[in-house]
Amino acid sequence: MPPSSVAARIGITLARPWVRAGCVLLSGAATAAAFPPVGLIPAVFAVAVLAWAVRVAATDRAAALAGWLWGFGFHVAGLYWIANALLVDGARHGWLIPFAVAGLPALLGLFTAAAAWCARRLAPSGVAFWLALVGCLSAAEWLRGHILTGFPWNLPAYVWDPVPAMLQPAALIGAYGLTLVTLMAAAVPALWFDPAAGRRGRVLATAGCAALLGGLALWGWARLPDGPAATVGGVVIRVVQGNVEQRDKWDPTLKPRHVLRYLSLSAAATAPTVRAEGVAPGAAPTVVVWPETAVAYLLDAGIAMPGLAGAVPEGGTLLFGAARAEGDRVYNSVLALAGDGSVRWAFDKAHLVPFGEYVPFRGILPIDPIVQGSRDFSPGSGPATLALPGAPSVSPLVCYEAIFPGGVVGAGERPGWLLNLTNDAWYGRSSGPYQHQAITRMRAIEEGLPIVRAANTGISFVADPFGRTLAELALGVTGSLDAPLPAALPPTVYSRSGDWPVLLMIALIVTVTRIRRA
């Protein structure tokens, strides 16, 4: 059959609305394969299908529908693992699975729908439309990370996780800037199916994107040191991964056994499961780190805990997660314990998970938070730099507080490292923990700070300020790792400027497309 006949048949088939809708939906789902743990980077070019569908839509409303279908498919495939959390106590929360698996993606798809609608209004076709769509999608991703507390999960920037050199530009432009670049490249194939783009426009746009990606990759490659990053002398971090199943975590009969497991793995005389390069055999840890809510008791931070003092290194600190009560309020906290069992400080999680740790509009929604218990957590005051013996000052982050670009370091003194305590046991052996790991490492690159992550069931790791992992405990492993603490870099461009340059670039793109149309 001649190629022209094949193309004609394909064109007739795609002209059917339900076929076109299915292609757009599936292309959104396919794009999720570009993220960990699959890491199929070429899958991100399925964004071009979205660009094509918006371009050929008959009306602005049809373009918005195409954007919503693409976003819905993308988020269903990328966030399916949220359902695992609702199965931990299926009797109470199982009925919420359809709302989590379909309802949340449906809401998040509205951002893509709005971007598609705006792009069509700005420029209906050609290179101007391509620029408009890239700018609007990038703006939508930024808004997704900020509106209604924000949820910037699986930003397109994270598809570069397997390529360290391509992650380094985050030190200049952050995850949102790298998202803009990624979307620009991913959507460019659509220009080759747009007659209005013209041959010159297609060639220039394609060559420009290739040059931009190549230039950023070369800069990132040059930024990466040839060998290991410098470390802080005399500091050894021991990260303990208790690997406690979420169903067992709050069982009153098992809690003492879990604490004993953490104490045993923390003892200085216990050999670590993983020892990073640079830690001599027999070297004692100076800081021991346990995950989020590793101590599954409701604590009073003002009371000494001598039972845990055995895990505190001599002259050092034990950092662990627990729920703590203060009056009628409950906080999801990180506590720093001294050698006598006294609490040096408590840091309270500020960015709480809606429906997970508190219920919005509790007065009209008759449900309890997903976490065990029926009380809402109260938010803390936000990022802070806290001093501790045994290591430089630290900025603690609890669970998904680490997913917010530009939101991991407080005003004032800059910390020497970032600490992320999390409990991904909620999500089992799904893609969720792998995605969370990649997202967390990006914060190290943006801020020029090393990051230490302790996860209940994994993935725990220590990464240098270039986002390179020094040591790791895999998902589902019970054990500990010892690693030196990488030294912080000078403040990065992004840590000083934040998202303003990227927002100005998006505004410039939108302005140019508007002027060109006029």
Image (spheres, rainbow, N blue to C red):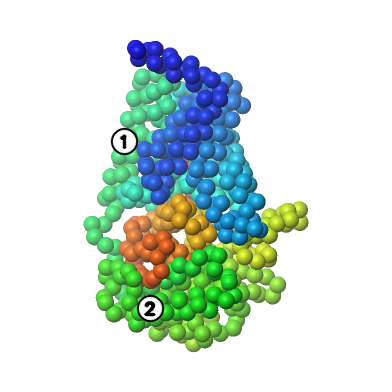
Q: Position of residue 448 (x, y in %)?
A: 38, 59
Establish if 158 lies above or below 462. above
If the image is split into quadrants, where does the C terminus sit? top right
Q: Is residue 27 toward the left or the right of residue 200 in the image?
A: right
Proximity of marks 2 and 1: CB atoms separated by less than 8 Å: no
**Badge 2: how crowded within 10 Å, few (<14), some, or many (20+)?**
many
Q: Which residue is mark 2?
A: 286
Q: Position of residue 445 (x, y in %)?
A: 39, 55
Q: Nearer the viewer, residue 211 or 262?
A: 262
**Residue at left offset 48%, top offset 16%:** 12
**Residue at left offset 53%, top offset 43%:** 76
Q: What element does badge 2 sit on?
A: loop
Q: Is residue 52 visible?
A: yes
Q: Is residue 82 toward the left or the right of residue 315 in the image?
A: right
Q: Position of residue 51 (x, y in %)?
A: 48, 29
The amino acid type of the residue labelled 2 equals: Thr
User: Which mark is drawn over residue 211?
Assistant: 1
Q: Residue furthest left?
A: 226
**Residue at left offset 47%, top offset 47%:** 154
Q: Is residue 158 toward the left or the right of residue 222 in the image?
A: right
In this view, the mark in front (2 or 1): 2
